[in-house]
Amino acid sequence: MASTAAAATQEPTVRVLARGLRILKAFQPHNDWLSNQEIAELTGLPKPTVSRLTATLTTLGYLIYSHPRGRYRLNLAVLELGYFALANQGLRSMARPLMQALANREDALVVLAEHDDMAMLCSEVCHSEHSIVSLRVHRGSRLVLPYSAAGRAYLGGLPAAARQALCDEIARRFPKDWPMLSKGIALAASEVAQHGFCITMGSLENGVSGVGVPVHIPNAPYRYALGCAAPSFHFPRDHLEQEIGPALLAVKRQIELPFTPALGQATR
């Protein structure tokens, strides 16, 4: 009964979302501007429903309204969604062979992750093909933001104001551990500024050490990070500083290059 009731309460929301997506899909290159009546005819939705949804989509930034025309068109927020989808796919396809080569060479775990609330969501994960010890991280795993190497690298790579705002939220969400976390995040920011990468020693999981680097691409410069981790006995600190950090930086630069027009043009 409870699950049936929950499904019943969710159904209207899902239907509204589906209708909103139908409206966005109605816009094509040949019909740049559309009125509510035209959208209703293209989607088969009642005009009052279309009017409510176009108003909401305009408020959210997905549509823009022209008073002189009395019509709507797609706004930049839709383009940003498409860009993020393409960029994520491009990043994954570009990053995976580089990540796998590093994972195999260092007998380690390498992840490409993106910020999602209080976590770093693993978009791509590469385990060493000959590792005896396998860390329990897979594509779709969520690494706790302020504890993981990727999360601290992400935080360390943020502009100061954005980092402070996110740290305020971390302090609210992790009050018990905040005194320890604040020191770790401050150290990560200092290391990223000085070396381009940061080091963690057992902060996410006891007995596991790692390196993180922020990854910056146009239109999504503060979104992604790379992490490389292994059992601490395999990754002593001097190895992290002298070998893993520079190697992960090299992977980062190779990933970023195709997404950086100025750099790409300079090499032609």
Image: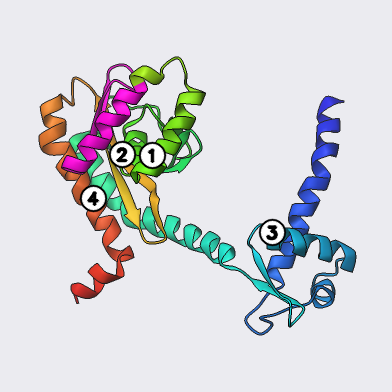
CB under 8 Å between callouts 1 and 2? yes
> Mark 1 or mark 4, which has the lower sequence index?
1
Query: Which residue has dot 1 on it?
Result: 163
Say which quadrant the C terminus sits in. bottom left
Sooner in the amino-acid sequence: mark 1 or mark 3: 3
- Identify the image's colour scheme: rainbow, by chain, secondary structure or one colour: rainbow
Q: Pointer 4: what residue?
A: 251
Q: Which mark is residue 114?
A: none
Mark 1–mark 4 Cα distance, whole angstroms, equals 24 Å
Q: How far is the residue under mark 4 from the one under mark 2?
A: 18 Å
The one of 198 and 1 positioned closer to us in this rendering: 198
Q: Nearer the viewer, mark 1 or mark 2?
A: 1
The magenta-colored residue range is 181-210
The image quadrant that residue 253 belongs to is: bottom left
In three-dimensional space, the C-alpha distance between marks 2 and 3, rounded to whole angstroms, equals 33 Å
Which quadrant of the rendered structure holds the N terminus? top right
Residue 196 located left or right of residue 5 = left
Q: CA distance from mark 1 to mark 2?
A: 7 Å
Residue at (81%, 29%) from the top-left corner? 3
Q: Secondary structure at mark 3?
A: helix
Q: Which mark is residue 59?
A: 3
Contact between labelled residues 3 and 2, with CB atoms less than 8 Å apart: no
Q: In this rendering, which labeled residue sits more in front, label 2 or label 3? A: 3
Closer mark to the observer between disc 1 and disc 4 = 1
Which residue position holds label 2?
156
